[in-house]
Image (spheres, rainbow, N blue to C red):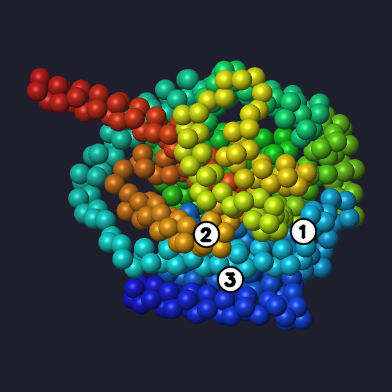
Amino acid sequence: MKNKKILVNIILTLLILLAIVLIHWQLGSNNIINLKVSTYIGVMVNLFCIISTITIEKKLTSPYTIFQIFSLIFLYGLLICEQILNFKPNDMFDLSILVTEENEILACFLIMYSQLFLQLGVIAEKLISKKESNNDKNSKNNAEKLEKAVLRKTGYVLIIISFLPAIYDFILNLRAAIVYGYSGLSQNATYGFSSIFDKLVPFFQMGLYLLLVGYKDKKNMCKFIFFFTIIFYGVQILFGNRGIPLIAVVVTIWLYHTAVKKIAPKILIICCILILPLSILINVIREVRVSYGIKDWINNIGEIVKNSVSDNNPILESIYEMGGAIYPTAYAIKVIPAEVDYKYGKNYLLGILSVVYINTSNSATNFANEMNIAAEMSEHSGAPFGGSYIQEAYANFGWFSVIFFFIIGIILEKINIKIEYRKNLISIVLIAYFLNPFLWTVRNVMVTLPRELVWYILPTYLLYRLIMNGEKKKERSECIEK
């Protein structure tokens, strides 16, 4: 039955892809396809990718589905507000002056092709992959008991080495945000050997994830770690750079739901209801993050919130601002290859090289711009408007980047299979950590992922294996003595 659904999904995806190609072919007639029509079609394609996958999997917590949901918000949020809801805030800098409407239309079609090929990669892998066996439940339970103990020990080691760097980084950014607002964070940037201390900070998040799953059978301890993690990263949304801590909160909830205990539907409903006050908070942060510090607006928080609700639509304003990834994508189409040559995979190769590259100088170098197309395009345009994984792929492979996304789709489904039929708990923890930088690529670039894999995921796994081997050796010694 499931294979029939997958086959139907493949046929529908191919038919939609053919329709998009035919519509794209008609772009020469300006009266037929405009930005509003492109937005409607793009949003429907994005929704199709989400709904069709949920129909097959009977859940919405797979990494691919979450990735597509984030894509709907970050890639189309601004266009949905402008073109569908006729909403445009008056107090935001209009980045559309950097591109033409034709650039934005082409960006919409590039996103559609990318998402459909991503979808094809996922469902093709679903069709050909074999389920992993998980029959020996008694053996699995015994192994899981030992594994949870090892997860806890590994987590404590990582917390010990990263606690001071993480707390110091938190306090430093909090103080800068209190005084200077969002702009204060840039003053805390470190380079050279002084940045090595900062490189330990991500291990704190990894350590918390290990402890969260390691204590899954100890209800009170597990909930304490869960809420501490949410509060610790949730508070960092106030620092101004909201995307990364927001994803950290989402992934923490995902890890708890996937590896510890499924969250009841009523809790999910409450979370949806909380979208309104959260959007107001996000909107307030947006309005004051550049010019004022937290200290200034906390003193006038009541008036600011009142003005935000009465004068504006906080939900739409939040979606509008978060959904600006269309501009870096459109700008890349505008200037590549007209003004800047294609990278032909150079960005991704430099991303791999960055694993062993360490900036020993006391300032930023050109390596970051050469590796990061979002940074290069921001410098070229004179506007720091971020980036997206689609912009990055286009800069390297042009319209042939869709083949790249087919491969990414296959990888995403392999990760999903690993989650669904996992044989150990360490895999789910490492995947959860990886989801943080991966989900952020919707609004960023993928070239940072090799560092995450080699600098944090691999050392964590090696430490885990080292402790696990030690525990198994201890068990064998005890058995021999008995």
Q: Which mark is residue 99?
A: 1
**Tag 2, which secondary structure?**
helix
**Quadrant (top left/top right/bottom left/bottom right) for the N terminus:** bottom left
Q: Which residue is mark 3?
A: 45
The one of 317 and 404 positioned closer to us in this rendering: 404
Is residue 357 something that shows in the picture?
A: yes
Q: Which residue is mark 2?
A: 401
Please provide percent x and percent y for residue 228: 57, 33
Q: Which mark is residue 158?
A: none
**Tag 1, which secondary structure?**
loop
Q: Residues within 10 Å of mark 2 (few under 14, many from 20)?
A: many
Q: CA distance from mark 1 to mark 2?
A: 21 Å
What's the residue at 20%, 44% (across, down)?
139
Q: In the rendered structure, which amino acid carries the disc numbered 1? A: Val
Q: In the rendered structure, which amino acid carries the disc numbered 3? A: Val
Res. 310 image quadrant: bottom right
Q: In the rendered structure, which amino acid carries the disc numbered 2? A: Ser
Check the image and report above or below for 378 versus 125: above
What's the residue at 90%, 49% (across, down)?
307
Q: Which mark lies nearer to you, 1 or 3? A: 1
Please provide percent x and percent y for residue 447: 53, 43
Q: CA distance from mark 2 to mark 3?
A: 18 Å
Q: Residues within 10 Å of mark 3 (few under 14, many from 20)?
A: many
Q: Is residue 230 left or right of residue 98?
A: left
